[in-house]
Image (cartoon, rainbow, N blue to C red):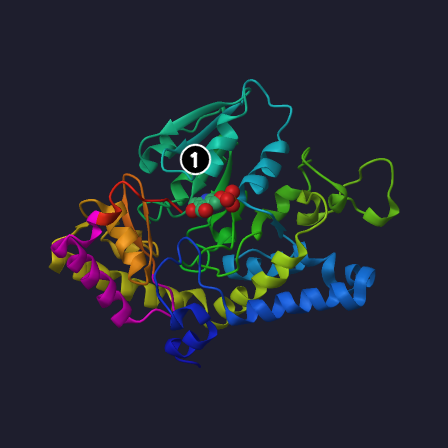
Amino acid sequence: MRELADYRSEFPILAETTYLVNHSLGAMPRKAAERLAEFSRMWAERGIRSWAEGWWETPWRVGDQIGRIVGAPPGSTVMHQNVAIAEAVVLSCFRPFDPGRNRVVYERENFPSVRYLYQAQPELEVVVCEEPGEIAARIDERTLLVPISHVLYKAGEIQDVEPIVRRAYEVGAHVVLDCYQSAGIVPLDVTALGVDFAVGGSVKWLCGGPGNGWLYVRPDLSETLTPTYTGWQAHARPFAFEEEMEYASGAARFLTGTPNVPAHYAGTAGYDLIEEIGVERIRESSLRQTQLVIDLADAAGFEIVSPRDPARRGGTVTIRVPEFPAVHAELEARGILCDFRPDAGIRLGPHFFSTDDELRFAVEQIGDILETGAHARHIGAVALH
Ligand SMILES: Cc1ncc(COP(=O)(O)O)c(C=O)c1O
């Protein structure tokens, strides 16, 4: 078994920066470039034959690999461009909406892509819970969907999903679990959780880059659903070009049009590493390192916004210090890549390849910046990303 430190050479950016922004854009594995080169080679040399030689099947072949990481059985997970599209496909299964069951219940801290999609549907009534703990109590017979986050993106807090799933099941509502901030860093088993749908992407802890969203549909449910947001890849016989739709079985019925093949080629480099190491081992390292960040921040007198309880803590520690957007900009100028979210603070997200020394360096530099006022030059001139 390789030591975690041995994986550092797989990530070129670690040689140049202190990379603590894996909750936003996970470091690129070196092999992603090789996979993209293979995609290019096929396009150049194999041309049209590439579809039959692997391109067409990437949404479910790569989806099965994600499935292995999140506890989904083969054939239940497919790739989409992003979470917004995956959730739109889920939503489309319930059109036309029953006016007696048109409520959507979620927490205020839900990610904007998800919030905006449901808010934009005039036939739906959105119930926003101030606290995640309220969600189960707000679900009733009028609830259609409960699109919630497994780990909240701002504070990095793990939600207790079981009571929500139980309540939804009792009243016939469906849970859509957004696992973007947990897949690859917090052990997750969508089958054991019993969720109806799970969605996520690969930009973050899976180190799979953009364009690699995914959708899991509970196998016993999938055949009963008819997505109205669809396309020819969801057809049972797409290359027959039939006039009428006949849905494929399994998760393939939730696909749309031509797949994002280059993204799928790039993504597997990260998934291979996550599978090789295993999420349990990654979690062990993450819990130890996030605790180290909390201890260092406590010693420096910084406010911690993330949960202190390890059972509730995702992969990110959010630290609130005065003028944190400007402090973040100065950290970036010093080669420490992290980010911040409004109303939250600076987010530090170490991954399995991060070292304790990098964490000590980052927290020490925050202290130095505040003490010397080096961030003053960035005040009023900060960009979010
Ligand atoms: C919890 C969560 N959901 C979804 C997204 C992204 O949504 P989309 O794939 O639609 O860009 C993010 C971050 O980018 C996130 O943190």
Of residues 178 and 304, the one nearer the viewer is 304
Q: Describe the element under mark 1 as helix, strand or loop.
A: helix
Residue found at x 42% / y 29%: 139
Q: Is residue 44 left or right of residue 323?
A: right
Residue 365 pos. (x, y %): 21, 61
Residue 255 pos. (x, y %): 68, 45
Residue 243 pos. (x, y %): 87, 36
Of residues 292 and 13, the one nearer the viewer is 13
Q: Is residue 304 visible?
A: no
Q: Is residue 379 above or below residue 309?
A: above
Q: Is 381 one of the magenta-colored residues? A: no
Task: Indicate the amino acid at tag 1.
Answer: Arg
All told, the count of numbered labels is 1
Residue found at x 65% / y 58%: 262
Q: Is residue 7 above or below residue 329?
A: below
Q: Is residue 265 left or right of residue 52?
A: left
Residue denoted by label 1: 167
Q: Residues within 10 Å of mark 1 (few under 14, many from 20)?
A: some
Residue 100 pos. (x, y %): 54, 18
Residue 344 falls in image quadrant? top left
Of residues 105 and 232, the one nearer the viewer is 232
Residue 128 falls in image quadrant? top left
Residue found at x 28% / y 50%: 346
Answer yes or no: disc 1 within 8 Å of ligand 1.
no
Quarter of the image where the N terminus is located: bottom left
Which region shows up in magenta?
350-376
Q: Is 360 one of the magenta-colored residues? A: yes
Q: Is residue 376 visible?
A: yes
Most extreme residue toward the bottom is: 1
Q: Is residue 70 left or right of residue 265?
A: left
